[in-house]
Image (cartoon, rainbow, N blue to C red):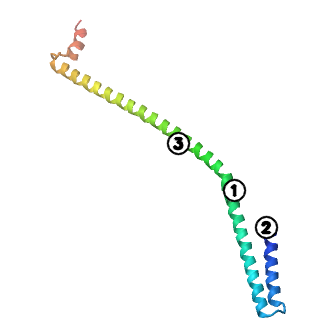
Amino acid sequence: MNKGGVFVIGALLGAAAGLFLAPKSGEENREDAKEFARGCLGQSQEYYQQGVQHFQSSVSSIRPTVDQSNDQLQAKIDAARKIIAEQVAKNAAASKAAADANETIDAEAEQAEQVAEEAEPVEAAEPEAEAEAPAEE
């Protein structure tokens, strides 16, 4: 609360004390009390309106900053979504390439097994006979 508000409250309290301590008739005191209450009500309504205006001006001054921050945040979110989508596409392509390579390897392995089964068995030379041959000379 500012100094002016404190002064007004002090003045109102002083006026109220003066009304009740002054040597007046009851009717005059009641009338003075009503006027005092009306004055307090009017003053409080004025303070309320000032507070509302201050709040509205504060909101108005903050809104552009909030809107700008919101726009910047939305731009960052959009950029992150784009990066994620690109990475997902790259991962999908790499996964497809790996699957294709596995299929090719499996097909080649199967073909090699078939060729191996169809081939005539080759007899291996006996290592002992080769080892003895040079010794006889």
Please name the residue shown 19% across and 18% down the image: 115
| In this picture, residue 135 sits left or right of residue 76 | left
Look at mark 3 in the image and give the residue it sits on. Answer: 77
Q: Amino acid at mark 1?
A: Ser
Residue sitting nearer the eye, 8 or 124? 8
Q: Earlier in the sequence, mark 3 or mark 2?
A: 2
Q: Residue at x 69, y 68 (%)?
A: 48
Q: Residue at x 76, y 86 (%)?
A: 31
Q: Position of residue 101 (x, y in %)?
A: 32, 26
Specify the quadrant of the image occupied by residue 92: top left
Disc 2 on helix, strand or loop?
Answer: loop
- Between discs 2 and 1, the one toward the N terminus: 2
Inspect the image, locate mark 2, and give the three-letter code of the amino acid beneath it: Asn
Question: In the visual, does 8 lie left or right of 92?
Answer: right
Q: Are marks 3 and 2 in contact (CB under 8 Å)?
A: no
Q: Is residue 102 above or below residue 9?
A: above
Mark 2 surroundings within 10 Å by alpha-carbon count, few (fewer than 14), some (14 through 19), many (20 or more): few
Numbered circle sitting on residue 57: 1
